Amino acid sequence: MHFDTINSTNIFLKEHWKDLPSETVVWADKQTGGYGRMKRQWIADRGGLWFSVLFKPTNIRPYNPWHYVRLYSLAIHDILKDKYKLETVIKWPNDLLVNEKKICGILGEAVFTGVIPSAIIVGVGLNVNNKIPEELKDIATSYIEEKNKKLHLEKLLKQINSHAYYKYYLKYFKRDKISAFTKQWIKKLNIRNGDFIKIIFQNEEKRGKIISIHGDYLEVEFESGIEKVYAGEVSLRKERVV
């Protein structure tokens, strides 16, 4: 399902999920109300790949929205590397970086009609042929900025969704296989056990060392002791050790 301009592909699916089948893909040339994690504004002008995917989990599929975010972070990482020779790393929990600059953000949202999610929506914002505004060039990049060439957006969209579905979703999105999938995702992260990080939570900063990395949280050693840091609550920055 394609739109020239829309406020947000995620909002569209949240409003129409009951009438659409699972695995419906909605994409737009431009979003006027794009947003990321913690409702941060996402500039989504023409040239980027802006799309959302609807999932309606059944009993055999996982209900945790973070699994579906990881599905697309891995698929986009693989396609950019294997098809377009662009190396990325996954920034815990939901961005893709090129040389420490964001090229892609991924947002997972759940729709509840009871105790468990009735729908999970994954929104992807991938900078492809769009030029990055001057004021964001220190923290963001796009494929065209890195490689000086344009990509065919519809072809890229199909490659990403096909890879996500056949490489990961059908094989791993079962209760007895999802932990193996999470281990693959952890291997592609930009952090490792022992790394020093800065955590930003409600404008408060804390520094610590990663003890262990799990699917939904990190164990971090702070001066005050070891704490669990959950993905949905904080922003994370990897610290450079001089």
Image: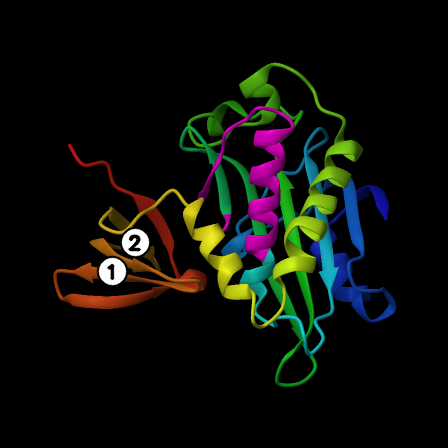
Nearer to the camera, 84 or 10: 84
Q: Mark 1 = which residue?
A: 220
Q: Position of residue 86 (x, y in %)?
A: 55, 26
- The range drawn in magenta is 69-94
Where the C terminus falls, by quadrant?
top left
> What separation in Å lies between label 2 and label 1 (alpha carbons)?
10 Å
Would you say 128 lies left or right of 12 here?
Answer: left
Question: What numbered label is drawn on residue 110?
Answer: none
Q: Position of residue 101 (x, y in %)?
A: 45, 32
Q: Mark 2 = which residue?
A: 199
The quarter holding residue 89 reads top left
Residue 52 seen from this side: yes
Determine if the magenta segment contains residue 187: no
At label 1, counting other C-alpha atoms closer than 10 Å, the crowd grade (few under 14, some 14-19, many 20 or more) is: many
Taking the spot 38% from the left edge, 58% from the top edge, the residue there is 234
The quarter holding residue 61 reads bottom right
Earlier sequence position, callout 2 versus callout 1: 2
Residue 207 seen from this side: no
All told, the count of numbered labels is 2
